[in-house]
Image: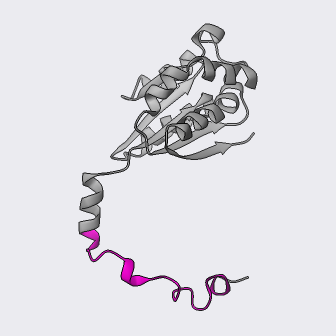
Amino acid sequence: MTVERLLGGDGMSEIPTNDLPDKSSTELVQEWEQAPARIKVIGVGGGGCNCVRRMLQHRHVPGVEFAVINTDVKSLESVSGNHNIDSIQIGQKSTRGWGAGGDTNIGAKAAEESSGALRKVLKDAELVFITAGMGGGTGTGAAAYVAYLAKEMGAVVVAVVTTP
């Protein structure tokens, strides 16, 4: 089925142009810069932390806040040590900073154990991108809980994950 068929004709006839703002693109950008959405990119687990680290090394995105969340304290230090971002070690009591050992139940439990700290980093976010790898314990176990909290707090949530 073609786009024209889905939209009913040439694809443009259904789009009301009289509803578009009567402003130049420069004016729209200026308005956006004055009141931007609160966007946060959250890396969960080792894979998610690596994604955030690479984003910070290669791109500067103004107005976007970054955070990393992991059970493994060394992984957190490798990312947050070079950048001024929020770094949350989850499951301090249950994992003692050693990671989840590939166990998704430990990752999920660690996230629940640290819900207060997670809520703090998610506070006021309107759009949350969560990045995680689905091959380990923390990313696989904790990313869904982080997404649940963000949605519960009113944010739109987008997950970008990798599979082994």
Which sits in the foreground, 67 or 35? 35
Rendered location of residue 47, percent (x, y): 62, 33
In percent of width and height, residue 6 lies at 66, 82
Quarter of the image for residue 75 reads top right
Q: Left of 139 or right of it: where is 90? A: left
Residue toward you, 86 or 80: 86
Q: Is residue 24 magenta?
A: yes
Q: Residue extending furthest bottom?
A: 9
Query: Is residue 20 one of those drawn in magenta?
Result: yes
Q: Which residues are magenta?
A: 3-26
Kindly identify the residue that appears in the image at 63 percent across and 31 percent down.
Answer: 145
Total labels: the figure holds: 0
Residue drawn at (44%, 26%) of the image: 120
Residue for point 61% across, 28% down: 46
State the image coordinates of residue 149 (x, y, percent, origin top left).
Answer: 56, 33
The C terminus lies in quadrant = top right
- Residue 41 placement, left or right of 139: left
Image quadrant assignment for residue 32: bottom left
The image quadrant that residue 9 belongs to is: bottom right
Position of the N terminus by quadrant: bottom right
The answer to whether residue 81 shows anywhere in this view is yes
Q: Does residue 92 appear to the left or right of 59 in the view shown?
A: right
Q: In x, y percent, where is residue 14?
A: 53, 85
Q: Nearer the viewer, residue 41 or 154?
A: 154
Q: Is residue 41 above or below residue 104?
A: below
Name the residue rendered at 24%, 60% in the picture: 30
Residue 102 seen in the current view: no
